Amino acid sequence: MKKIVITGAGNGIGKATAKACVEAGYYVIAADKDREGLRSLQNEIQVNYLETHLVDFSLPDVYKHFIGNLYQHHSALYGLINNAGLYHGKSVYDYSDEEIEEIWAVNLKSLVYLSKDFAQREVHAPHTRNIINITSVAGEVGSMDALYGATKAGVIGLTKANAWNFAPRIRVNAVSPALIRNTSIHDRIPEHRRKEYERQEVLKDPIEPEGVADVIMFLLSDHSRHLTGKVIAVDNGAYPR
């Protein structure tokens, strides 16, 4: 059974992806600091397809050792989905020093270590492995939350660089969602920004986490075997670029 690591798996896109992975026959290693979210996931997924880890990816001792610790119990991993992220929806002027360090660690720095450690162990695997990073339209067109936009732009740069670094055995791609409903950050987006996202959408079916999970599943599959270093927008056609 192929094993998939999903960070931020307790809600939203991460939870939808975990459920989609299990439905597709994968074994899911779900990590989050949201205890209740992980419990909810455990109630919805058969125990023999899931293991959960209560962890905080803002902490160096966590993100520097998380992948290595998994290999003490698993001989191989097939995919890493870097989904954990923070969004505060506020001006850079309002960030405390602690919040700056935290969002930098969770949204970008942890991805460096998780991806590197995964690649070092799977670079000689007999079959292709996958890293999928969750960025945001904010990383492409900017955000009123400068720290969020900057870290998500960094995820795009990291994706493209690691596609080169980890080739040919490991493919690295990113998914760039726009306005996604039913996520932990949706209500933190200022109302005028939500209305602007909606105005830009040319397809009017609201995007749910499951719609993003569908794209992630495509990138995990052999149907995307010729793609690496790509950023796939899930945005209802908003912000044409």
Image (spheres, rainbow, N blue to C red):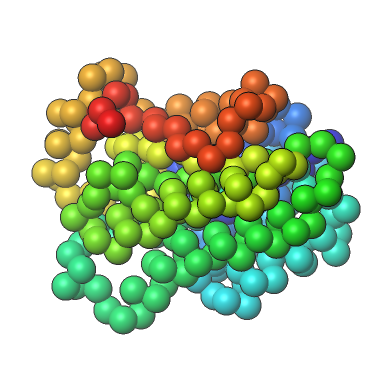
Residue sitting nearer the eye, 21 or 125: 125
Residue at 85 percent across and 64 percent down: it is 72
Q: Quadrant of residue 193?
A: top left
Residue 186 seen in this snapshot: no
Nearer to the camera, 11 or 26: 26
Is 180 drawn above or below residue 131 in the view shown?
A: above
Residue 191: image location, x then y, percent: 15, 45
User: Dividing the image into 4 quarters, which one contains the N terminus?
Assistant: top right
Is residue 207 in view?
yes
Image point 82% across, 60% down: which residue?
Answer: 71
Q: How many marks?
A: 0
Q: Residue at x 69, y 33 (%)?
A: 22
Q: Is residue 116 above or below residue 224?
A: below
**Direction from residue 115 to residue 25 in the image, left or right:** right
**Residue 116 location in percent, x, y?**
66, 60
Image quadrant in which the C terminus is located? top left
Q: Determine whether, in the image, residue 64 is placed left or right of residue 75.
A: left
Give the residue furthest to the left: 192
Camera-side residue: 72 or 228? 228
The relative height of residue 234 versus residue 94 in the rendered view (above or below) is: above
Residue at the spot 27% in from the left edge and 79% down from the top edge: 96
Q: Measuring from the top left, give residue 151's x and y in whole percent.
A: 38, 59
- Judge left or right: residue 13 versus residue 32: left
Residue 188 left/right relative to 103:
left
In this rendering, is residue 131 above or below 67? above
Image coordinates for residue 154, horizontal then vertical, percent: 41, 57
The outermost residue toward the bottom is 97
